[in-house]
Amino acid sequence: MAQPFDPAAATQAYLAILTPAQHAKATAYTQGGYWVLLWTALVSVLVALIVVRSGVLVRVRDRVERQGPRPWRAVLAVVAVDTVLEAVLNLPWQVYAGWWREKAYGLTSQAFWGWLGEQGISLAVSVIMALIMFGVLYWLIRRAPRLWWALSAVGLVVGFVLLVAVQPLVIEPLFNSYKPAPAGPMRDEIVAMAKQVGVPYDKILIYDGSKQSNRYSANVSGMFGTARVAMSDVMFKKDADLSEVRGVVGHEMGHYVLHHIFKNALAFGLVALLGFFLIDRLFAPASRLLGARGVSGVSDPAGLPVLGAMITVFMLLISPVTNSIIRTSEGAADRFSLEHFDEPDGLAKALVKTIEYRAASPSRLEEVLFYNHPSVGRRVRAAMDWKAAHPKPEAPPAASNPS
């Protein structure tokens, strides 16, 4: 008689696919990342302090304003100079955190000069986005000095949704090549899955994600006609079978069908509402604390580094909340995959391959504070609980040939 299925034992069996040394390495990487998070914030504040005390943005503002009373020109000039200057000052830390550390843990095979070239592209994109975002922000501050913080939160939600819509067309192709998945059983299966749950199925792509990272990943990005399913080639270099593809792509389709982009945008809009309100009330003391001479107030673009430092500190302090928002949607996407495609073992096999960059079994407090996905251990256990609650009928034994 077959033994009853034990979800706990099955979970431990999946986690045991990795050796103790591999788990220890993943834990070291993950827990070291907590310090990276803190030091990244501290470096950002230090860079803002250097820029503010240099007075360079005040001089840029004054020079532009002498040419005529058009505040938008001063905003654009200051934003462009500040974005480039802070990026350059941040670069040594980014080399360590974004490339050297990833290389040391075997999570990227990208050469340094390739990484640096992409940082240049990212900087160009950042300058354009900063000009748009802060141009609108300072316009709102000037036009609605009492309510700018509320209007800016609304604008952030709208901007986020628009960015998601254009990202597959404008931004992602700058960094990776996307090609249609080749004809065959995998593509046919994904098309069938997409039709089953109402996800666009005419854009199923594979991209060269291994160029930047050795992480096992897939995504559904875009909206309003730009939506597509994209799988990193890492999935196939790590021998993903069809059950894994179904589990992972089903998860990503869950994000699309459950409207997580809109829901998370609204949730982050509420976070931004609080953040902008605090900036409105605390900008003056923060400006004095950083020694921002010549900055007249929150509407002065020369105070942009102060604004940036306040956002950095706020986002660090609020990160348990923002992580929980994302973590909740990730858990819901797992459930969607299981409910609609019933691949608990495929999902579990895929999840185990992500342990190398996300320790499998953190404490509950650690997970709440730092994880923006449920831990792999909890996710695999949820998949095994699903499997136990939804047993598949056993295939009938093959009939024996009469002798």
Image (cartoon, rainbow, N blue to C red):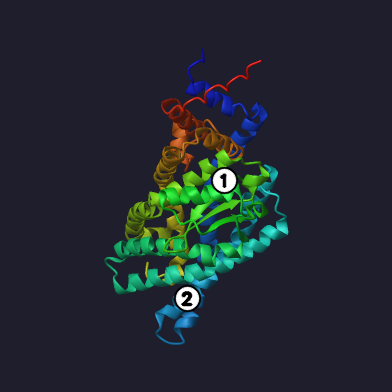
Is 360 on the left or on the right of 288, as rendered?
right
Is 284 on the left or on the right of 77, as rendered?
left
Give neighbour class at mark 1: few <14, some 14-19, many 20+ (Cα, 10 Å): some
Please determine whether, in this image, residue 277 is positioned above or below residue 401.
below
Residue on which disc 1 sits:
36
Check disc 1 and give the amino acid type: Val
- What secondary structure is found at the residue carrying circle 1? helix
Q: Position of residue 51 (x, y in %)?
A: 53, 65
Q: CA distance from mark 1 to mark 2?
A: 31 Å
In-front residue for pair 400/263? 400
Q: Is residue 292 visible?
A: no
In-front residue for pair 211/57? 211
Q: Earlier in the sequence, mark 1 or mark 2?
A: 1
Is 139 on the left or on the right of 237, as rendered?
left
Please determine whether, in this image, residue 265 is positioned above or below residue 27.
below
Please determine whether, in this image, residue 2 is positioned above or below residue 336.
above
Residue on which disc 2 sits:
76
